[in-house]
Image (cartoon, rainbow, N blue to C red):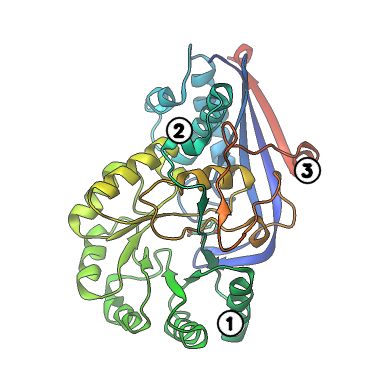
Amino acid sequence: MNLRAIELRRVCLPLVSAFRTPLGTESVREALLVRVESDDGEGWGECVAGSDPLYCSEYVEAAWLTLRRYLGPKLLGAPDLTATAVQPLLREFKGHRMAKAALEMAVLDAQLRVAGVSFSTFLGGVTGAVTPGVAVGIMSSVEELLDSVSEYLDAGYRRVKLKIQPGWDLVPVEEVRDHFGDDLMLQVDANSAYGRADVVHLAQLDQFSLLLIEQPLDEEDLIGHAQLARSIATPVCLDESIVSAQSAATAISLGACSVVNIKAGRVGGYLEAREVHDVCASRNVPVWCGGMLETGLGRAANLALASLPGFTLPGDVSATARYFREDITPPFLLRNGTIAVPTGPGLGVEVLRPVLDALTAQSETITRADH
Ligand code: NPG
């Protein structure tokens, strides 16, 4: 396809409840959406960078500038563009994986809509419904946490991920385990809140039969994660440390993790995410789909990714109601403990234009003529 225009939109979606993690508290999800326009139709992408550079170095304003100044113009000038050509074309620009992933997602959506193929089919999905988990933030009291977990279990979730940090770890985990019993699939996520000196402390989590502990140490500390993995029984899972299929292979070889969280934005797109999946599958490392509080667009793509065979653990791909009262697509529903993977062409979801327009804080269109 030949791109005619790329539209950037910054949308602000209020969360149903504030989400507190070791990185900060979010009560409104700011998202950067990308719409590509070609002679054959349009496609949508979502950049999962946050409002501030707290999860990683990318953030919405910087991604916008990068897309407008470098990445967008490069694709607008490319003849016969396909999704597989996006990353090679953008390789000269270092980093900015989330911005690149959004563009690739939009091109892939446009391409698959024309071809009449769903994201899931294209990626190699093998299931029509995925079992979601739910991520539960840090609360101001254990009582509040138990209430929150209880509501999610009532809603049908069977796997819970608790955010932990020093001062909010052993006690809340023990209380949740005691209160809800051994059948609850329970895991924890530290977003790098601990250091190598905390190994003995973290080993105490072993008594709670957790599925895994996610990203306990600094993202660059693979050796520290390998040492930790040898010292504790709880499986170590990496999130922030895994930025490509190559870094996944390295981390696994070093023994830094035995489980991987895959987020397409973090690794530069859904095609690279599939590579990470393949690398992990070839080493018998289970994976699950991470979440970045996506709108319905990113959620549709994540459900497709999570339908691949190596995604054997429930992911952070919860139903829309867990996040937003109103989304820019029709809601994804939890039914009998699962969420359906979209089957329509491309992302398989349509944007609700009036809602999108009402939630849009900023927009800009770049065209070939501009460059
Ligand atoms: O269900 O989308 C979700 C949220 C899952 O905890 C979650 N995401 O560290 O993985 C994370 C965390 C996150 C969310 C990080 C937003 C950064 C931004």
Residue identifier under label 3 = 355
Residue contact between numbered discs 3 and 2, judged by CB atoms under 8 Å: no
Q: Is residue 255 visible?
A: yes
Q: Is residue 197 left or right of residue 101?
A: left
The answer for how far apart the CA atoms under marks 3 and 2 are is 29 Å
Q: Residue at 47% across / 58% down in the picture? A: 315
List x then y, in percent, for residue 245. Answer: 30, 42
- The amino acid type of the residue labelled 2 equals Phe
Front label number (3 vs 2) = 2
- The amino acid type of the residue labelled 1 equals Leu
Specify few, some or many for label 1: CA neighbours under 10 Å numbering under 14, 14-19, or 20 or more: some
Residue identifier under label 2 = 122
Q: Is residue 138 left or right of residue 286?
A: right
Numbered disc 3: secondary structure: helix
Q: First in sequence, mark 3 or 2: give its number.
A: 2
Numbered disc 1: secondary structure: helix
